[in-house]
Amino acid sequence: SIRGEKGFWAKDGSRVVWVRELRTSGELANIELYEFDDENRFKRFARVDGARHVKGGWQLDHVQSTWVDGPAARIETYASEPWRVSISPSLLEILSLDPDEISLRDLWSYLDYLDENGLDSRSHHLAWWQKLVAPFGNLVMLFIATPFVFGPLRQAAFGQRLFVGILIGLGFFLVNRAMGGFGLVYGLPPFIAAVLPTAMFFAAGALAFSRIR
C-alpha cells in the first residue's frame, strides 16, 4: 500500500485500487479500479463514485467499467456492484496512520495483508520490531544511568551530569532512527536494524559499569 495526501493505492490479488477519499464514516469515494487476469494482462478499468462496507465485502455505487478484450473494449455502467476484497475498514484505518502510531497487534494484521499480496513490508516489519524492543531500550537507559550514580560522574555537578545524560539519550534516539533508515536502504533485516542500537548502548553501559570502582 502507498499512502499520500491525495488518497492511497492498495493491492488485493490481481486488483489494484486507488482511493482518493477515505471518509470518517469508513466509506470510500472517488475510486479507480484496475484489474488484471491470471497472466497479468490488463482487463478492466473502472471509475466508482463511492463504496460502503457491507457483510461479506464492499458495495460499489455508480460504477463505470471499461472492459478490455484484445484490441476491443466495451463500456458498461452499473448502479451498484458487489466488491469482495480482503481490504476491511479496520485495515483502511491502519493505512491512514504512520507505522509508529499503530499498535503491535494491528501492525501484525497489516503485515499479513502486505505479505499475502506480495507488497514491500520492510518498513512495517521494522516498526513492529522497534515497538517490541522499545521496553528493553528503556531498561538499557536505566542501566547506562548506573555509572552516573556510582561512577566518577557522581562527584560532578548536577548540571554536568544532566547535560551528559541528555547527550546520551539524544544519541540513542538518533542512532536508533539512523539505523532504521540504514537498514531499509541497504536491506538489513528489520530485526537486526531494530535490536542493534539497543545492543550497542547496552555494551557501552556494560563497559562503563565494569570500570566502576
Image (cartoon, rainbow, N blue to C red):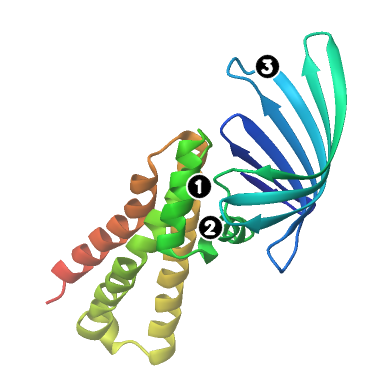
Q: Where is residue 32 drawn, in percent x and y?
A: 78, 40
Q: Which mark is residue 123?
A: 1
Q: Are marks 2 and 3 in contact (CB under 8 Å)?
A: no
Q: Are marks 2 and 1 in contact (CB under 8 Å)?
A: yes
Give the quarter of the figure containing the N terminus.
top right
Query: Does 35 appear above or below 180?
Result: above
Q: Residue at x 34, y 46 (%)?
A: 192
Give the structural element (helix, strand or loop) at label 2: helix
**Mark 2 or 3, nearer chain start:** 3
Q: Is residue 118 left or right of residue 128?
A: right
The image quarter in which residue 54 lies: bottom right
Q: Residue at x 63, y 20 (%)?
A: 37
Q: Residues within 10 Å of mark 2 (few under 14, many from 20)?
A: some
Label 3 is placed on what type of residue? Arg
Q: Where is residue 165 drawn, in percent x and y?
A: 40, 77
Q: Residue at x 41, y 54 (%)?
A: 108
Query: Does 120 appear above or below 72?
Result: below
